[in-house]
Image (cartoon, rainbow, N blue to C red):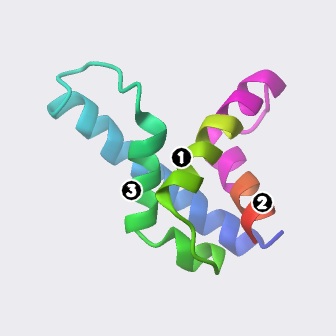
Amino acid sequence: MNPNAVTQIARLLSQAGSAHHQYEQTILKGVYDQEWPAWYANYVIEHGLANLLNQEVTAGQISQFFIESYQIYRKEGSNLGWVDYTAQQLVEKFC
């Protein structure tokens, strides 16, 4: 696993989280976004995820990955925060 890629992807996911929070508050007027995996996927793709993974990925692939990974994350009860856990999982799966 490339620790530098994990760190950079974690940073990107954190940025996505901040932007998504703003989106929920302003556009959705505080309503929980049931479609958050697709929103996050589009955001990270638009902000260079493929470069960090060193391969092309689609928003559909990453959205599905977020759905599956989040379910596993919750089931495992990881000690890591979601951002760090997901960054590691992305690198393991796609690098």
Question: Residue 64 appears in which quarter of the rendering?
Answer: top right
Write the residue at 76% across / 72% down.
95
Question: Which mark is in front, 3 or 1?
Answer: 1
Q: Earlier in the sequence, mark 1 or mark 2?
A: 1
For the residue carrying disc 3, how many other residues have a C-alpha within 10 Å: few (<14), some (14-19), or many (20+)? many
Towards the viewer: 5 or 89:
89
**Tag 3 secondary structure:** helix
> Residues in magenta?
70-87
| Residue 71 is a magenta residue | yes
Write the residue at 38% across / 56% down.
43
For the residue carrying disc 1, how many other residues have a C-alpha within 10 Å: few (<14), some (14-19), or many (20+)? some
* Residue where numbered disc 3 is placed: 43
Q: Is residue 95 left or right of residue 7?
A: right
Q: Is residue 45 above or below residue 73?
A: below
Number of labels in the image equals: 3
* Residue where numbered disc 2 is placed: 93
> Horizontal and vertical percent for residue 82?
63, 38
Measured in 3D between alpha carbons, the distance from the residue under mark 2 to the one under mark 3, in whole angstroms, is 19 Å
Q: Amino acid at mark 1?
A: Ser
Q: Is residue 52 left or right of residue 18?
A: right
Q: Is residue 31 above or below residue 86?
A: above
**Tag 1 secondary structure:** helix
| Residue 65 is a magenta residue | no
Towards the viewer: 40 or 57:
57
Q: Amino acid at mark 2?
A: Lys
Write the residue at 36% across / 44% down.
18
Q: Main secondary structure of the magenta part?
A: helix
Q: Amino acid at mark 3?
A: Tyr
